[in-house]
Image (spheres, rainbow, N blue to C red):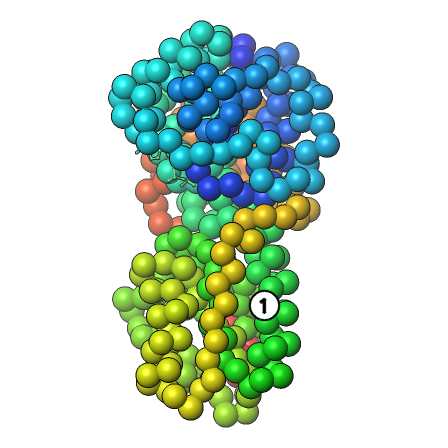
Amino acid sequence: MGAVKCIGILTSGGDAPGMNAAIRAVTRTAIYNDLRVKGIYRGYKGLITDEIVEFKSQNVSNIIQLGGTILKTARCNEFTTPEGRKIAYETMQRHGIDALVVIGGDGSLTGARIFAQEYNIPCIGLPGTIDNDLYGTDTTIGYDTALNTILDAVDKIRDTATSHDRLFFVEVMGRDAGFLALNGAIASGAEAAIIPEFSTEVDQLEEFIKNGFRKSKNSSIVLVAESELTGGAMHYAERVKNEYPQYDVRVTILGHLQRGGSPTAHDRILASRLGAAAIDAIMEDQRNVMIGIENDEVVYVPFSKAIKNDKPIKRELVNVLRALSI
Ligand code: ADP
């Protein structure tokens, strides 16, 4: 093992259920291996404003079941400047922090990558985002919980959609990725998903009306990924009103409720494994990698790969949804 004695841990960017399970796993695995741990509050902002607390095992008691992040999270513009990162580095030095574990999405891991290169600090990233849009891991921390929240909501919407013979567009999160919309649609028995990945390929509304919205059905639910590329659920509702006025159309935007709630077993186990693996990686002198799990094995993914490569949507899933919605 290298000279690392004290690890700083932070959560950054969008919060995701399971981040607490990851904080707990990093903290306890580090202490188990005789490393010190410091909790950095509000993401990179805490490195600039010096909001740092020594973490003992008890600091992470009773949090595995909690949504959100006990370390809080923030977006920090100052950290995107060399001046801001210099202050962050000086704060780390004052606290004796010699390695960082960053839990967040692609923005946070981009920040970690730049910081690590600039100051030659070992940085390990954990994929924490409900969007599942990081390459090199089968799923990200929070994705499974968000998917289950979507199911719960769509099950309820279906009751009212069926009673009124309505067409519902349900907008879900995902930024520029369609994983939540597509898998949410399959799991909830929705009729279609409109996702950014196919936004330039086909007119997904036309396709849905043509293929999915059969005469045999009197209600229908379409999940729309919130994205500039799709235009969002309102855009499709307007189009239906103009182009297919025979349909009674409604919109539900699920919004931030998708980020909340107690993490599922899948996300707790994923976060625990990734958190433990982050400390293993530091002790193996790995640096500047994101930890992922692929095919049930822990993998180290260079930041450049995790961030830059667009994680592909499986065509098979699109075909499954189409076949099952007849
Ligand atoms: P997420 O991690 O969920 O994708 P953001 O994209 O908002 O969230 O990024 C979170 C934070 O990571 C930003 O507020 C900023 O502090 C840091 N960050 C993002 N991009 C960069 C960058 N290019 N350089 C330095 N820091 C960055």
SS at badge 1: helix
What residue do we see at 48% from left, 29% from top?
42
User: Where's residue 19, x and y in %?
Assistant: 57, 37
Which amino acid type is shown beneath numbered disc 1? Answer: Val
Does residue 153 appear to the left or right of 124 in the view shown?
A: right
Q: Foreground residue, 217 or 162?
A: 162
Does residue 48 appear to the left or right of 222 in the view shown?
A: left
Does residue 131 appear to the left or right of 276 in the view shown?
A: left
User: Where's residue 179, x and y in %?
Assistant: 47, 57
Mark 1, residue position: 154
What residue do we see at 44% from left, 66% from top?
224
Please tell me whether residue 280 is drawn above or below residue 270 in the rendered image: above
Which quarter of the figure has residue 231? bottom left
User: Can see residue 207?
Assistant: no
Please tell me whether residue 45 is drawn above or below residue 106 in the rendered image: above
What residue do we see at 63% from left, 63% from top?
152
